[in-house]
Image (cartoon, grey):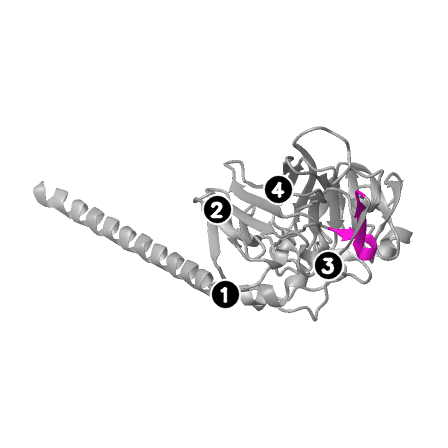
Amino acid sequence: MRKKFFIPLLAATLLAYSCQQGAKKQSTEEAAVDSIEHNAFDAVIDGKDVKLYSLQNQQLRVTLTNYGARLVSLQVKDNKGKQTDVILGYDTADEFKQNASNYYGAIVGRYGNRIGNASFTLNGTTYELEKNNGENSLHGGTNGVYNKVWDVEQASDTAITLVYTSPDGEAGYPGTVTIKVTYSLTDEGGLVIDYNGSTDKETVLNLTNHAYFNLNGEGDSTILDHELQIDADAITEVNEALIPTGKSLAVAGTPFDFRKPQTIGSRIDTDNEQLKVGKGYDHNFELVKCEGFRKVATVYAPKTGIEMQILTTEPGLQFYSGNFMTDNDPKGKGGKGYPFRSAFCLETQHFPDSPNQPSFPSTVLKPGEQYTSKTEYRFGVR
C-alpha cells in the first residue's frame, strides 16, 4: 500500500516541479522580453531621461513612454484569446523622436488639430504660432507637447500620471500651462485617459491622444474592412487646406453617415467634394450633444472579432483614415510596414480652429479654471 501511494506522490511531485520550472522559465522569458523592450527606450532627449512604462490587468497590457506621454503598444485579446497589439509605433525612443511629426500614440497640443493661418486673436492680442502644416499650425506646432519629455508624477501597475509644464510663449501660445495626463486600466477592458490643465494667463487648450489603430493588429495592411459607427449628425466642413469654413454639413445621405455601422472602405472613394479634399476621411464629426461622459463611437474588426468602444466628454471626434500614409514611411515595430490606410485615428477633441470660429465650442482657459477632459477606449470581442 505504501509503495502504491509513494509512486503517485512522486509523480505528482515531479509534475509540480516541472510546472514550477516551466512557469519560472516562462516568467523569465517574459521578463527578458520586458527588459529588451524597456532597455530600448532608455534614452536622453533634450537633456531628460526617457523610459518605457507598463500597465497591465487581466484584459489589457499597455506600454507607454514619457516622451510625448505616448502610447507605444496596446495589447488586447482577440476572439481566439490571442494577444494582439492594436496600435502603431516604433521599437525605440529614438525612432519616435526621429519621426515625431507622425504623432504615433502621442498626446498632442497645446492645440490638437489645426489652427488656420497659424494665428488667433485673444483679448485683442494676436498670437503667431509655429507653421508646420503649410500656412497652418497642426497639433501645437513643432514645439507641441508631443515632442517634449514629460515627468512621471506617480505610477502603479494599472495607472500612471505624467506632467508637463509648457512655458509662456512656447510655440507661440500665451500662458504657462501645466498639463497632467493619467492613463488607467479598468476591469471592463478600458483604457481611460484623463486630462487636466491650468494656466497663469488666458489661453486656449485642446488636448487629445493621437493613437493610430488597426484592430486586425498593427502591421496589417488595411483598416478598410473595419466597421465604424459614430453618433454624429454633422461634420465640420473644411477647405482645401483642411481648415474649417465655419459651416456644418449634415451627414444624412452622404458617405459621412456612420450613425449606423458601415465599413470604412465601403464609401471612401465616393465622388464627394469633402472626401476629395481630405483624400479620404479626415474630418471633425460633431457629436450628438449630450452632457457628461458617454459612448460616442464603436469600431469592429471582423478578422479578429475585436471591438473598440469610445467614450468621452468631448463634443467632437476627428476621424482620420490614414490617407497620407505611404509604403515609403519608416518601418514600425518589428520592421513592419505601415502602408496607405493601414490605420485609423479617432481623436476626441474640441473642434479644429475653434479660436478663430466664434460659433464653435470655446477652448479658452482662464487662470483659476481647470481644463478637464476624459476619454476611454474600451475593448471586447464578438
Asked if the magenta segment contains residue 117, the reply would be yes
Q: Amino acid at mark 3?
A: Arg
Number of residues whose C-alpha sits closer than 10 Å to that of mark 3, classed few (under 14), some (14–19) or many (20 or more)? many
Where does the N terminus fall, quadrant-wise?
A: top left
Can you identify the residue that label 3 sits on? Answer: 341
Q: Position of residue 230 (x, y in %)?
A: 75, 39
Q: Position of residue 240 (x, y in %)?
A: 88, 57
Can you identify the residue that label 1 sits on? Answer: 44
Q: CA distance from mark 2 to mark 1?
A: 18 Å
Query: Which secondary structure lies at badge 2?
Result: strand
Q: CA distance from mark 4 to mark 2?
A: 14 Å
Can you identify the residue that label 4 sits on? Answer: 197
Q: Position of residue 212 (x, y in %)?
A: 65, 54
Q: Is residue 249 above or below residue 14?
A: above
Picture residue at 18% right of the left edge, 45% below the top:
8
Picture residue at 69% right of the left edge, 61% below the top:
142
Can you identify the residue that label 2 sits on? Answer: 153
Residue 260 figure quarter = top right
Query: Which secondary structure lies at badge 3?
Result: loop
Identify the mark nearer the N-term, 3 or 4: 4
Do residues under tags 4 and 2 come within 8 Å of each other at their CB atoms? no
Identify the mark nearer the N-term, 3 or 2: 2
Do residues under tags 2 and 1 come within 8 Å of each other at their CB atoms? no
